[in-house]
Image (cartoon, rainbow, N blue to C red):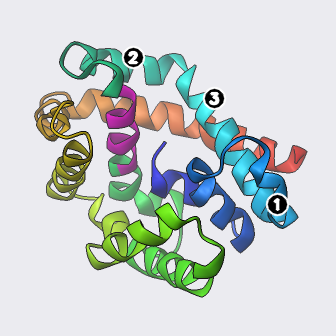
Amino acid sequence: MNFLAHIYLSGEDKEIIIGNFIADGIKGNQYLKYPPNIAKGIILHRSIDTFTDSHPIVRRSTARLHENYGHYSGVIVDILYDHFLAKNWDRYHEQPLNEYVQEFYQLLKDNYSILPSRIQKMMPYMIADNWLFNYATIEGIGKILAQMNIRTKGVANMDQAVNELKEFYDEFEAEFTLYFDELIHFSKQTLDDL
């Protein structure tokens, strides 16, 4: 899953949200250096990634992209799934998406000093371009995929994946919906167990 899903699946605890968001920048047992709830967020993120990578519905979505994008297919599906979460946000959360993401951006600003340097560098771009809110549109996802393609120096051609999103839109959305219901349950259970 990508940023929006990880944030959403963290629940309401601000430290768990931060931990889940920064987790990709925390290697090995470095999470032990953080306060307990940030560490929980990092562990939750890793659990979500493991669950996602092995899930048959996600693999079905990924397989649809594999011929054109190889091992980048999983990254693309994560981004596409965030599109469907943002697009259908009112199905999952009472607070309007724009308010929710603005509160999250403020949370990042308030906790800037504990963010890994990679996140500190990315944060101004994320906020300025309002990535999380713009996931809700195909155009917004197209921009994210184009930015990701630049990061891979054009090797992945990820910017082209918006074509598959349009062509197989209903299939991807149906897969996301089935999968995400399971992931919500899994994430709640994982948080209860931590």
Q: Secondary structure at mark 3?
A: helix
User: Considering only vertical position in the picture, is 95 above or below 157?
Assistant: below
Tell me how far mark 2 sits from mark 1, CA to CA: 37 Å
Which residue carries the number 1 mark?
Answer: 33
CB-based contact (under 8 Å), mark 2 and mark 1: no
Residue 141: horizontal and vertical position, in percent? 23, 52
Identity of the amino acid at label 3?
Phe
Q: Nearer the viewer, residue 94 or 34?
A: 34
User: Considering only vertical position in the picture, is 2 above or below 106?
Assistant: above
Residue 73: horizontal and vertical position, in percent? 32, 26
Q: Residue at x 18, y 31 (%)?
A: 155
Which residue carries the number 3 mark?
Answer: 51
Disc on the earlier residue, 2 or 3 = 3
The residue mark sitting in front, 2 or 1, is 1
User: Considering only vertical position in the picture, is 149 above or below 122?
Assistant: above
Which residue carries the number 2 mark?
Answer: 60
* Label 3 CA crowd tier, 10 Å (few <14, some 14–19, many 20+): some
Where, by quadrant of the figure, is residue 182 drawn? top right
Q: Residue at x 42, y 60 (%)?
A: 89
Identity of the amino acid at label 1?
Lys
User: Majority secondary structure of the magenta segment?
Assistant: helix
Identity of the amino acid at label 2?
Arg
